[in-house]
Image (cartoon, rainbow, N blue to C red):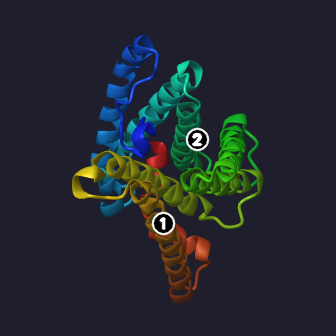
Amino acid sequence: MPEVTDADDDFRQMRAGSTHGTITHMMNPVLAIHIGAGSLALASMLIPMVTRKGGRAHRRAGWVFVSSMGVVSVTALLLSGGRLLFESRPEAREFAFFLLVIALLTGSAVSAGVRVLRFKERTAARLHWWDTGLPALLGAASLGLAMDGLARGQVLFVSFGGIGMLSAAGSLRYWLRPPTSRMHWWFEHMSSMLTGCIAATTAFLVIGGSSIGIWPLAAWLGPSIIGVPAIALWTRYYARLFTARASTSGTSPATAGTAAAGTLAGIARA
């Protein structure tokens, strides 16, 4: 997500500097890496959606997207952390914490999207510190953000605080419970990667939306308002597809789902 501030109530101002000019100057290389990685993620995110699942193009573009979003998340943590440590203005520090939550949300989603493929054969709950710790941290930070937003009347903070808590709860529920279907990994991988796509799209609209007259709050919330229901519809579509194939072939939905997935399992081995 973009490293922005709330100067003049414009969330798209990326260059609104800290009161510590030296710190701002030191952060400029990190910001450049952040922007470059975000651009690469945006350019690569559509390829895995439209190419054959598990094919070479899907895997290669998917790893480009995941790697880029990983860099975006780490650099966003550095940028927001720098603001929290060195910024003197209370309102700027509060917005830096908001950006930190967005970085955690993005990183948690992309991480889960990859790791579910590594452990798709699991039959029990998985309590690894990374898989459960990252969403737990996201949930705690999102709760704090939502509470701060309620206290200050900030719709943006309340909205993303709620989104973060829902995302954290979903990840924890996935890892802390045994899988209920053989295709659990398919749906978790798909929803997590699409969440990363929502983050990349939001960044693009926040930075470039001013040139086409997009309202800042709409730029921040629009992709989530559209993307979250789209993920639910896509998930429902594949659930019905797997069930339909099972009924026509006389196999279980899990077996039919595995056949429908084709070579998607190759992602985990790539």
Q: Residue furthest bottom?
A: 248
Could you tell me which residue is drawn at 74 percent across and 46 percent down?
126
Which circle marks residue 101 in the picture?
Answer: 2
Can you give x and y, in whole percent of width and height, for residue 60 in the image? 33, 44
Tell which of 39 and 130 is nearer to you.
Answer: 39
Q: Quadrant of residue 185?
A: bottom right
Tell which of 26 and 246 is nearer to you.
Answer: 26
Q: Residue furthest left?
A: 211
Q: Are marks 1 and 2 in contact (CB under 8 Å)?
A: no
Tell which of 92 and 269 is nearer to you.
Answer: 92
Residue bearing the label numbered 1: 225
Q: Residues within 10 Å of mark 1 (few under 14, many from 20)?
A: few
Could you tell me which residue is drawn at 29 percent across and 40 percent down?
40
Q: Residues within 10 Å of mark 2 (few under 14, many from 20)?
A: many
Can you give x and y, in whole percent of width and height, for residue 221 in the image? 47, 58
* Amino acid under disc 2: Val
Q: Quadrant of the C terminus?
A: top left
Q: Quadrant of residue 6?
A: top left
Could you tell me which residue is drawn at 36 percent across and 43 percent down?
12
Horizontal side of 128 relative to 259 (left or right) equals: right
Could you tell me which residue is drawn at 57 percent across and 47 percent down?
112
Mark 1 vs mark 2, CA separation in Å: 18 Å
Q: Residue furthest front?
A: 8
